[in-house]
Image (spheres, rainbow, N blue to C red):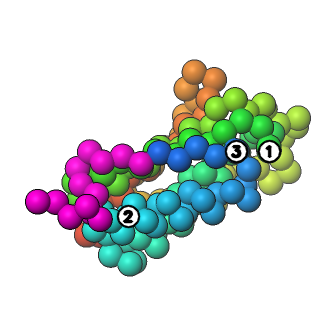
């Protein structure tokens, strides 16, 4: 019998919140809880928590802050957790950010160091970023 405190293969948690940078802490908290219940050790949990914060920031790049919603979906895949972050209903920023490209590059470098796979794409007018982290060691 499965312990009700554990998450197993196929279990999924969704969180939707306003697309504001100050609310990314919610995504980090949920990620910590999910990864702990999926059997990740404390170092992997912390890597995943930080990576999800960067994933959310990357998803928000180039949009007008305060519009739209961020939808976070965490799915347990055996020895891995997959995370999708989708930005829907957000307006494009009025102009390019002075340091937007540098910020995006830094987020990508952080993701490279913390997770096994990640990506970002435009999909049906929405921005979607994703990552996957396996238990037992990311070879950085």
Residue 138 in sight here: no
Compared across the picture, whether 135 is left or right of 111 comes to: left
Which numbered disc, 2 or 1, marks the residue that appears first in the sequence? 2
Give the magenta range.
1-13
Where does label 1 land, which residue? 65
Q: Is residue 109 magenta?
A: no
- Contact (Cβ within 8 Å) of mark 2 with mark 3: no
Question: How far from the left and from the top, in percent, is residue 46?
Answer: 46, 73
Q: Is residue 108 left or right of residue 7?
A: right
Most distant residue in the right direction: 94
Tell me, for residue 120, which label it has, or none: none
Seen in the image, is 98 located left or right of residue 47? right
Image location (x, y in percent) of residue 61: 70, 45
Residue identifier under label 2: 35
Name the residue at 47% across, 45% down: 14
Query: Which residue corresponds to mark 3?
Result: 18
Write the residue at 64% across / 46% down: 17
Main SS of residues in magenta: loop
Residue at the (69%, 29%) spot, across then down: 89
Q: Is residue 7 magenta?
A: yes
Which tag is nearer the camera, tag 1 or tag 3? 3
Q: Residue furthest left?
A: 1
Mark 1 vs mark 3, CA separation in Å: 9 Å
């Amino acid at each position: 019998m499965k312990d009700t405190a554990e998450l197993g293969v196929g279990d999924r948690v969704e969180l939707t919140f306003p697309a504001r940078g100050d609310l990314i802490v919610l995504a980090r908290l949920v990620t910590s809880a999910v990864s702990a219940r999926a059997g990740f050790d404390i170092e992997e949990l912390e890597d995943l928590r930080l990576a999800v914060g960067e994933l959310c920031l990357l998803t928000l790049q180039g949009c007008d802050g305060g519009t739209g919603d961020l939808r976070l979906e965490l799915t347990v895949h055996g020895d891995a957790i997959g995370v999708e972050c989708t930005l829907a209903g957000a307006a494009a920023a009025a102009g390019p950010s002075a340091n937007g490209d540098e910020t995006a590059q830094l987020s990508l470098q952080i993701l490279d160091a913390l997770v096994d796979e990640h990506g970002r794409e435009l999909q049906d007018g929405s921005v979607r970023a994703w990552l996957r982290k396996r238990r037992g060691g990311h070879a950085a």
